[in-house]
Image: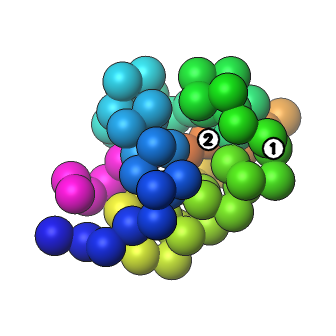
Amino acid sequence: MVDLTPFARKIYDAMDTLGAKSEDKTKSADQIMEKVKMGKGQVNQSLQELLKKKIIKRKARSKRAGYFICQEV
């Protein structure tokens, strides 16, 4: 099991609930932020932690990047 900070765990769980489980179902940082009721800085920091640990992936889109889960924890 991957060791995550409590904030990163909250972000992961929110992405799971939102259905961001494949490249065609990405969610923006703003959508995730609304779900978890956390500040943008903390959400972005937690997304970076999940990206570094290769639990989620980032997909560049025309207006905003999207994130999706690529590894179960």
**Front-most of 51 and 8?**
8
Give the residue displayed 39% in from the left and 67% down from the top.
4
- Quadrant location of the C terminus in the rendered image: bottom left
Residue 61 bears which disc, if any?
A: none
Q: Residues within 10 Å of mark 2 (few under 14, many from 20)?
A: many
**Front-most of 70 and 48?**
48
**Up/down of 4 relative to 17, above or below:** below
Residue 72 in picture, x, y percent from top left: 21, 53
Residue 54 in picture, x, y percent from top left: 39, 71
Label 2–label 1 contact, CB within 8 A: no
Is 68 on the left or on the right of 59, as rendered? Answer: left
Residue named by callout 1:
40
Is 52 on the left or on the right of 53, as rendered? Answer: right
Q: Residues within 10 Å of mark 1 (few under 14, many from 20)?
A: some
**Up/down of 64 relative to 5, above or below:** above
Residue named by callout 2:
66
Secondary structure category for the residue under label 2: strand
Is 65 on the left or on the right of 12, as rendered? Answer: right
| Closer to the eye: label 2 or 1 | 1
Label 2 and label 1: CA atoms lie apart by 15 Å
Callout 2 amino acid: Gly
Residue 57 in picture, x, y percent from top left: 48, 58
Give the residue displayed 50% in from the left and 44% down from the top.
11
Secondary structure category for the residue under label 1: helix
N-term mark: 2 or 1: 1
> Is 72 part of what is drawn in magenta?
yes
Magenta-drawn segment: 68-73
Callout 1 amino acid: Lys
Camera sees residue 15: yes
> Is 56 part of what is drawn in magenta?
no
Residue 71 in picture, x, y percent from top left: 25, 58
Is 15 on the left or on the right of 44, as rendered? Answer: left
